[in-house]
Amino acid sequence: MQENDGAGLERTRNLLKEKLLGWMPLPGRYPTAIEGLTIIRRDSVNQPENCFEKPLVAVIIQGFKRSIIGSEEYRYGENDCLVAAVDLPSVSYITEASPDRPLLALSLGLDKYLISQLTAEVPPSSRSGNSSCRGISIATVDPDVLDAFLRLAELQEKPEQIPVLAPMIIREIHYRLLIGPQGERLRMLNTLGTQTNQIARSISWLRENYKAPLQVDELAKRANMATSTFHRHFRELTSLSPLQFQKRLRLYEAQRLMLSENEGAEAAALTVGYESPTQFNREYKRLFGEPPHRHVSQLR
């Protein structure tokens, strides 16, 4: 049975590889007509990509990546499925890709309301999995999940079917993740009233209010936790303290403003909530290894 699953997985992966190469003749991130679905091609290695991912599931079809998510490093590649269950800061490096054999991947945003609905309807899985409270997990992709991704992506060739079939397949992907080895953490994070869900809600609040001064005591109170308990659970989920998390939010957004909006370092610092440009420069260099102006010039 495992051999059949492996052969089926490889057939599906090869079909997806052929489709993705046809849809993406050049490297880049390509949004699709299917809401939440993005396809990615990268032809070179080592160019860092900083981002603050919203909850998503990503499948690597070809190539390999190394990501620092929060304060931990993850390596993953062909036939791996990454589930980011909460908003987390990350910097990623392509470690294996070339024009002849590019990195190919698909990502789909996770719908927390759909997960909550399915969690109430679907009994917990008896399959063993990593019960860690981390907001990120990596596992070999389930053949049924990969098949659903193939069917979802192929709807681009039949756009008239997207309004009816895409929501059904997206629901199926969420369901299959919930009953699989990565499902337990999704269940924990999206079950109202649990401490893990309270932390996830605090992360969403921080994402929306990162410019404001951080009052951890107030965040803890909003989550109905003692401050020390809040700190511990927050770090378990993100591998960062609330203050470190807010700094990443600010610094990643400042970098985006400098790169994409051509803002100067001082203007970007003020925009994201820093009162002192000197402090901004110091914290930027501590995270990225270079002062803002020099680093942004290198990235360009």
Image (cartoon, helix red, strand yellow):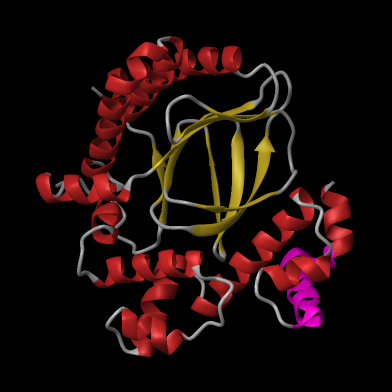
User: Residue 190: within the magenta?
Assistant: no
Query: Is 81 above or below relative to 74?
Result: above
The answer to whether residue 177 is above or below residue 120 is: above
Left or right relative to 275: residue 151: left
Residue 23's spot in the image, x, y percent?
58, 16
For residue 284: magenta?
A: yes
From the viewer's side, name the closer residue of 249 and 98: 249
* Closest to the observer, 82 or 76: 82
Q: Along the line of sight, which residue is nearer the eye, 300 or 276? A: 276
| Predominant secondary structure, magenta span | helix
Image position of 155 with respect to 186: above or below: above
User: In the image, residue 64 lies at what x, y percent?
Assistant: 60, 36
Horizontal side, residue 296 vs residue 174: left or right = right
In x, y percent, where is residue 242?
50, 77
Answer with left or right where residue 292 lies relative to residue 149. Answer: right
Q: Quadrant of the N terminus?
A: top left
Q: Residue at x 29, y 56 (%)?
A: 185
Residues in magenta? 276-292
Residue 243's spot in the image, x, y percent?
55, 79
Q: Residue at x 70, y 54 (%)?
A: 256
Instruction: Work out whether 227 lies above or below 20.
Output: below
Q: Is residue 123 visible?
A: no
Determine the residue positioned at 71% across, 48% down.
48
- Total marks in image: 0
Q: Residue at x 27, y 83 (%)?
A: 224
Which image quadrant for residue 220? bottom left
